[in-house]
Image: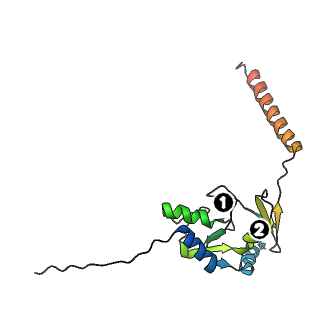
Amino acid sequence: MAQSYSAAVYLVRLVSSQDLLDQLRRTAVEQQELCRRRVSEKLRSDPENEISTTGLQVSLICPLAKMRMCVPCRARGCAHLQCFDASFYLQMNEKKPRWTCPVCHRYAPFDELRIDSLLCEGLESCDEDVEEIEYLSDSSWRAVRHDKSDKNLFNIKHSKISCIHFSFLMIERKGLI
């Protein structure tokens, strides 16, 4: 009985994360109308539910890099509005390929990634200190500013002092001091 053998030769080309990012920018940008429709569907009120959502907040900070996104994307099958930074995601998968969405943990391979042009607009239009935007029921958005004034800082510090003082009193009353 003769043994049979087979051989295969594969010609492969290493594609860098930058090449993939360039390809994504050329071929996988979702039109704003599609992005707006997705927002509208998320905000559509359910007639059986008495509570209707009038806005949804989305972070401009990448859940992976913990920095402001440059190229916001998500996989086509993801149901969430939150994006992650495509550049960082591709770099991460270049080193250790897992291809898992950092938001919902679904399989998110390169060919399923889509750049969110509506969130791109938000990133370009907002000041660098803005970390969130809110999508409104008419599919528009607005920047969410968190007041970081000295007044709020005082209230937080005062609150912490009161909390520490209260804890100290409770320990003292229990006879632990």
Foreground pick, 60 / 16: 16
Residue 92 % position (x, y):
54, 61
What's the image's color scheme? rainbow
Say which label, 2 or 1, has the lower sequence index. 1
Disc marking residue 150: none
Which amino acid is tagged 2? Glu
> Which residue, given by chain and number where applicable, does mark 2 sit on?
124
Task: Specify the quadrant that holds the N terminus.
Answer: bottom left
> Which residue, given by chain and number where applicable, does mark 1 sit on?
62
Which amino acid is tagged 1? Cys
Q: Residues within 10 Å of mark 2 (few under 14, many from 20)?
A: few
Q: Is residue 50 above or below residue 32?
A: above
Residue 9 % position (x, y):
32, 78
Q: Is residue 87 left or right of residue 126?
A: left
| Whole-number angstrom distance, CA of label 2 to CA of label 1 | 15 Å
Q: Secondary structure at mark 2?
A: helix
